[in-house]
Amino acid sequence: MNRSATLHAQAPVTLYHDGQCPLCQREVAWLTRHPRRERVALVDIQAPGFDAGALGTSFESMMGRLHLRDAQGGWFIGMDASRALYAVLGYRRLVWLSCLPGLAGMLNAGYGWFARRRVCFGHWLKQR
């Protein structure tokens, strides 16, 4: 995916999230209060009846990284899903900065490291 593709994500988007992850729950709560919340549909992949196969992917893949689908049917995965989400919510300058050479690679790597540990971080934050 080229660096600017996330800036062109079209609303409404569908954000597929882990409803049992404490950090994901915080993000979803923030999104439900956001002034542009109508631009984002939220789907809990842990909900009964959710079928990742119907979307052409697996539950395991969706648990490993954030997935977002835009109005044109384009998929954004991992850090690109976060970028596309924030672009749709109106934070385009922040997204543009996160796409700069060097910074983009560091953020992508940081996302991968964080995504593998998100549940542990969430439980740790809950205890504090």
Image: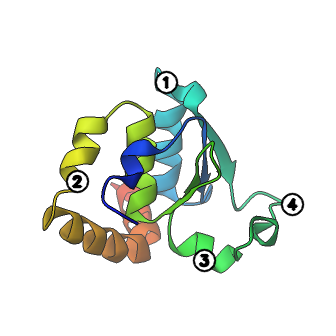
Badge 2: residue crowd in 10 Å (few <14, some 14–19, many ≥20): many
Q: Secondary structure at mark 2?
A: helix
Q: Are marks 2 and 1 in contact (CB under 8 Å)?
A: no
Query: Spatial distance from mark 2 to mark 1, Cα to Cα?
Result: 21 Å
| Kind of residue sitting beneath label 1 | Arg
What residue sits right under mark 3 in the picture?
61
Q: Residue at x 38, y 40 (%)?
A: 87
Q: Residue furthest left?
A: 102
First reached walking from the N terminus: tag 2 or tag 4? 4
The structure residue drawn at horizontal position 54% and vertical position 28%, both measured from the top left corner, is 37
Label 2 sits on what residue type? Ser
- Answer whether labels 4 and 3 touch (C-beta < 8 Å): no
Disc on the earlier residue, 3 or 1: 1
Whole-Å distance between the Cαs marked 4 and 1? 28 Å
Q: Which residue is mark 1?
A: 36
Q: In this rendering, is residue 110 above or below 68?
A: below
User: Residue at horizontal 36%, vertical 75%?
Assistant: 112
Type of amino acid under label 4:
Gly
- Mark 2 vs mark 1: which is more N-terminal? 1
Q: Nearer the viewer, residue 122 or 92?
A: 92
- The alpha-carbon separation of the residues under discs 2 and 4 comes to 35 Å
Residue position marked by numbered label 2 in the rendering: 98
Q: What label sits on residue 49 in the rendered view? A: 4
Q: Amino acid at mark 3?
A: Ser
Residue 88, by quadrant, is top left
Q: Judge depth for marks 2 and 4 and give the one in front.
A: 2
- Residue 46's spot in the image, x, y percent? 71, 62
Front residue of 95/117: it is 95
* Distance (Cα) linking label 3 and label 1: 28 Å
Q: Of label 2 and label 3, which has the lower sequence position?
A: 3
The crowding category of the residue bearing disc 3, from other C-alpha atoms within 10 Å (few below 14, some 14 to 19, many at least 20), is few
